[in-house]
Image (cartoon, rainbow, N blue to C red):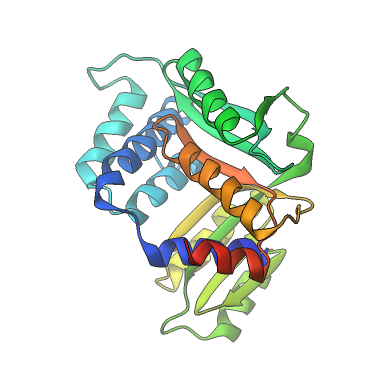
Amino acid sequence: MSGHSHWATIRRKKGAADAKKGAIFTRLAREVVMAAREGGGDPGMNIRLAMAIERARAQNMPKENIDRAIKKGTGEGKDGVAMEQLYYEGYAGHGVAVMMECVTDNRNRTVAEIRHLLSRGGGSMAEAGSVGWQFKKAACFSFSLEGLEEDKIFELALEGGADDVNMEDGTAEIIAPVEQYKNISDRLHAIKVFPDEAGIRMLPTQDVEIEPEKAVQVMKTIDALEELDDVVNVFNNLKMTDGVIAALESE
């Protein structure tokens, strides 16, 4: 996980361009809508909604946007467009597997856009189940260690049922079973720690190592996929070696 954590840290340091903020809010709002539609508008009773709200707040999404998305999901809003959550599987080129989490009101559009980007990058769509077995779901939290004691964070994670804790470059990442998400989230909030990233992710069971220049091509494809309005997350099994990270940082 440390390679993935390192790349996540690099991307956070680079920051999101202001021009992309609208697209980020669109994806976050769709997550909130889907969560509220499935489990109701009370985050205290709907863990998926609580997670979606937490991710939205971490990206500084305005409260009125979040509230509007919740009302839309519970049917209180005026917009009656039907949204659905879907997972697509594929390869982003050079044998790197990708799982794409999407929320869309038009699956035909979403599939066409994903297929185009994968094909352009030398990859392809895959049949359901042919890629998913290479990933497992886990609860993940990432936050700055500034002002925190590493020993106390490690102890908190251990007591909360975490499987792994990574601390690198001033950032902590906690990996835990899905069912421990709320437990660890509550423990972090109790000590006034609000993660930059928190949610259920699909982690690769085994990484694929490729040459740095090929990895740059793959990451360009993944970045393009992540910029699609309908795509919420893109999970991959690319191994982030030092050579790959250096190549990405030089781009």
Quadrant of residue 146 within the rendered picture: bottom left
The answer to whether 163 is drawn above or below residue 55 in the figure is: below
> Who's the residue at 48% across and 24% down the image?
113
Q: State whether residue 46 appears in this view.
A: no
The answer to whether 131 is drawn above or below residue 125 in the figure is: below
Left or right: where 53 falls relative to 84: left
Q: How many marks?
A: 0
Give how far across and how far down residue 173 sits, in percent.
Answer: 58, 67
Q: State whether residue 248 appears in this view.
A: yes
The answer to whether 62 is drawn above or below residue 91 in the figure is: below
Left or right: where 233 falls relative to 97: left
Give the position of the N terminus as an image quadrant: bottom right
Give how far across and how far down residue 149 sits, in percent.
Answer: 52, 86
Give how far across and how far down residue 76 sits, in percent.
Answer: 26, 22
Between 150 and 88, the one nearer to me in the picture: 88
Between 198 and 117, the one nearer to me in the picture: 117
> Who's the residue at 25% across and 22% down the image?
77
Quadrant of residue 23 within the rendered picture: top left
